[in-house]
Image (cartoon, rainbow, N blue to C red):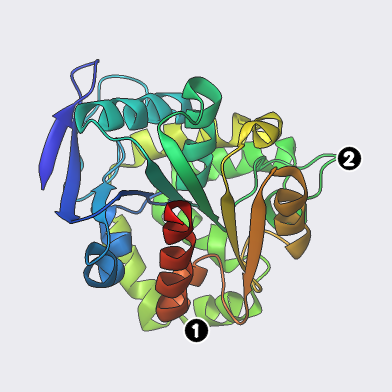
Amino acid sequence: MMHFVADDGQSIRVQVTGNGPPLVMLHGWTASHEEWQMFVKALAAHHRLFLWDARGHGDPVLPTETPATLQRMARDVHQMLEYFALTDVTLVGHSMGALTAWEYIRQFGTGKLTRLCVIDQSPKLLTDSNWACGIYGAFNAERAARFLQALRNDFIETVLQLSAHGLNARARQTYDQDTRGWQRERVRLAKLMPAPLTEIWESLTQADLRDVLPKVTIPSLVIHGAESNFYPLQTAEFLRAHLPDAVLHIYDNTDHCPHLWQPTRFVRDLLAFAKADAV
């Protein structure tokens, strides 16, 4: 792993490998660069990969003095691109990573980017009487406040229940059965520091990035899990309708991590999408 130092002195780890046009991949909340490891060999044959651990994330977690927020992570992305002198970037974001990418575009525009891929994410997590494309289609401010308190009381189980108690019936069933996958997740989450991750979560729920979408004038690839734990299909349709140049791929029989369930298809789709800018 390499490191760069952000302007607040925070050291941020980045895995750099491969050759070719730059491909920067931003992981989801509570995850790390490990999210992308099954794709490294296939993608690194065509691209120079930059896989970070966002501040507050990774194992071991590097402590951060600056409040960990979506806005700060977007500045970290900017400084990472500056540090490695990257241009013509294909930027990929899953879940929190997609929000980070949109916030980066809000702050810094698309000048260093050529393509954007977003995986199973809404531009606004909280729902209200005029917005049903957030978490579960029904996650209002009151419910968000209860969830935030639950994170502070029992971080590990609350994170698991966010996925388990959502729209995906298979997740609910396997959580109730306490299958090995959920047991492994408890072990993984126990290695993390709840405080910065809870801080980040709160900032994610405060974000509304719908106004950024029309400013994403570069081509966008939207990948959505047909059985997403969090977001109904109408969320993906909203993105396709409001991003100026977007194509939508629905991955059948997949949850909030469609790329992990169908890795071969994901690599094929992403390579074809990234290559198109060279035509």
Q: Are marks 2 and 1 in contact (CB under 8 Å)?
A: no
195 lies above or below 259: above
Callout 2 amino acid: Ser
Q: Residue 194 vs residue 165: left or right?
A: left
Q: Residue at x 22, y 67 (%)?
A: 45
Question: What residue is disc 2 on?
Answer: 129
Q: Residue at x 32, y 56 (%)?
A: 189
Using the image, tell me which numbered label, if any, was put on residue 177.
1
Residue 196 in picture, x, y percent from top left: 35, 34
Residue 140 in picture, x, y percent from top left: 75, 41
Q: Residues within 10 Å of mark 1 (few under 14, many from 20)?
A: few
Q: Earlier in the sequence, mark 2 or mark 1?
A: 2
Q: Quadrant of residue 252?
A: bottom right
Q: Quadrant of residue 164?
A: bottom right
Is disc 2 placed on a helix, strand or loop? loop
Marks 2 and 1, Cα distance to the nearest angstrom?
Answer: 35 Å
Q: Nearer the viewer, residue 230 or 258?
A: 258
Callout 1 amino acid: Gln
Using the image, tell me which numbered label, if any, was put on residue 146.
none
Residue 12 in picture, x, y percent from top left: 20, 35
Q: Quadrant of residue 142?
A: top right
